[in-house]
């Protein structure tokens, strides 16, 4: 039977402050996710303008609304998994929620642009 690896060979461990900051950023992101999803649902309000002489691309409007409503939880879950993997590997993870926020915001805005471009 072989001896366990000495602790000196393990990768560096993150500090308690880094983990606390990561946890606080993830909590902040968790608060923003339902708000963004809720407002993403309202991209579909554009259907109100699709009457009479004002034609709309309803498929694009529905896709933009779906992107705005579904992307925040999907990005949050991906960010959460990425944070857990980095912490398990003893790597710094405080910046991952910030990247998740930036990516989630970009996808959400893409959904808003998609929905608004569908209106005639």
Image (tube, helix red, strand yellow):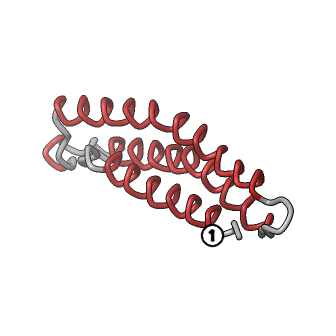
| Residue placed furthest toward the left | 8
Q: Is residue 107 above or below residue 25?
A: below
Q: Nearer the viewer, residue 66 or 43?
A: 43
Q: Is residue 99 above or below residue 57?
A: above
Left or right of 107 on screen, residue 117: right
Q: Quadrant of the N terminus?
A: top left
| Residue 9 or residue 74, whichever sits in front | 74
- Placement of 91 over or under 27, stated as above or below: below
- Provide residue 87's location: percent of width, then percent of height: 33, 42
On the image, the x and y values in percent for residue 34 come to: 55, 34
Q: Please give left or right for residue 18 compared with residue 48 in the image.
A: left
Residue 49 vertical position relative to residue 31 in the rendered view, above or below: below
User: Closer to the camera, 118 or 97?
Assistant: 118
Q: Residue furthest front?
A: 53
In this rendering, would 24 be left or right of 13? right
User: Residue at (52%, 55%) from the top-left corner?
Assistant: 108
Residue 109 at what x, y percent from top left?
Answer: 50, 59
- In the picture, residue 21 is in which quadrant? top left
In the foreground, 44 or 108: 44
- Residue appearing at x 25%, y 33% in the figure: 19
Q: Residue at x 46, y 33 (%)?
A: 30
On the image, the x and y values in percent for residue 100 come to 40, 51
Which residue position is annotated with label 1? Answer: 117
Few, some or many residues within 10 Å of mark 1 (<14, 14–19, 20+): some
**111 with respect to 51 (left or right):** left
Q: Quadrant of the C terminus?
A: bottom right
State the count of labels.
1
Element assignment for label 1: helix
């Amino acid at each position: 039977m072989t001896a366990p690896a000495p602790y000196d060979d393990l990768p560096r461990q993150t500090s308690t402050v880094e983990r606390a900051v990561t946890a606080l950023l993830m909590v902040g992101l968790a608060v923003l996710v339902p708000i963004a999803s809720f407002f993403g649902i309202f991209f579909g309000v554009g259907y109100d303008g699709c009457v009479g002489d004002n034609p709309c691309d309803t498929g694009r409007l529905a896709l933009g609304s779906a992107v705005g409503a579904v992307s925040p939880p999907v990005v949050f879950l991906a960010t959460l998994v990425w944070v857990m993997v980095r912490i398990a590997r003893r790597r710094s993870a405080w910046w991952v929620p910030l990247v998740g926020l930036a990516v989630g915001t970009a996808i959400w805005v893409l959904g808003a642009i998609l929905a608004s471009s569908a209106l005639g």
